[in-house]
Amino acid sequence: MLYTLTIILITIIAVLMVIVVLLQSGQGQGLSGGIAGGAGMIGGGNMMGARRTADFLSKSTAVLATMFLTLCVLANFFIDQETVTQSTIQDRAVPPVQTEQDFGAPAETSPALPPQDQAPEPPIED
């Protein structure tokens, strides 16, 4: 129950963090220069200046990132470990086949190449 709630919070924070990062300005003008910069011309005064918007977005990114990291670490402690005895890979693994082999004696197989001291047999003609 607590693990599910933590995962839901992590997902919400991740989506919010993506939105906040995309709203920040890069080298050009983002939200801080486009919307807030034009507000000064319309209203006669600059209520929410470009610098204040950039500070708010930077601080909110740092807060969201800190919350995300903290919740990810805490989620590891909330995982139910009592029911899990083996991993899924270990459950599906096929046990190795045990065969008794004598690795001390060399194998008795025919050589792959014919002996070099014998001449090849002549072909049989009809």
Image (cartoon, rainbow, N blue to C red):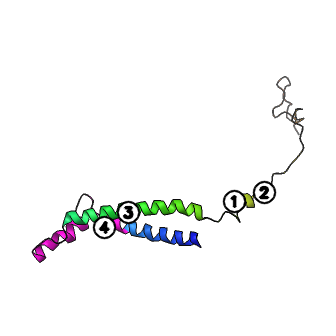
Badge 2 density bin: few <14, some 14–19, many ≥20, Cα 10 Å:
few
27 over 33 or under it: above or below: above
Badge 1 density bin: few <14, some 14–19, many ≥20, Cα 10 Å:
few
Badge 4 density bin: few <14, some 14–19, many ≥20, Cα 10 Å:
some
Residue 91 in the figure: left or right of residue 107: left
N-terminal of the two: label 3 or label 4?
4
Element marked by disc 4:
helix
Residue found 39% across the figure and 69% down from its top: 16
Cα–Cα span, label 3 and label 2: 47 Å
Cα–Cα span, label 1 and label 2: 14 Å
Element marked by disc 1:
loop
Query: 73 or 89, which is in the foreground?
Result: 73
Element marked by disc 3:
helix
Cα–Cα span, label 3 and label 4: 15 Å
Labels 1 & 4 near each other (Cβ < 8 A): no
N-terminal of the two: label 3 or label 1?
3
Kind of residue sitting beneath label 2: Val
**Nearer the viewer's eye, disc 3 or disc 1?**
3
Name of the residue lying farthest toward the left: 44
Residue 33 magenta: yes
- Range drawn in magenta: 19-47
The residue where tag 1 is placed is: 87
Residue 17 in picture, x, y percent from top left:
39, 66
The residue where tag 2 is placed is: 94
The residue where tag 3 is placed is: 63
Identify the mark at residue 23; answer none if there is no mark. Answer: 4
Query: 126 or 15, which is in the foreground?
Result: 15
Cα–Cα span, label 1 and label 4: 41 Å
Kind of residue sitting beneath label 1: Ser
Residue 43 in picture, x, y percent from top left:
12, 77
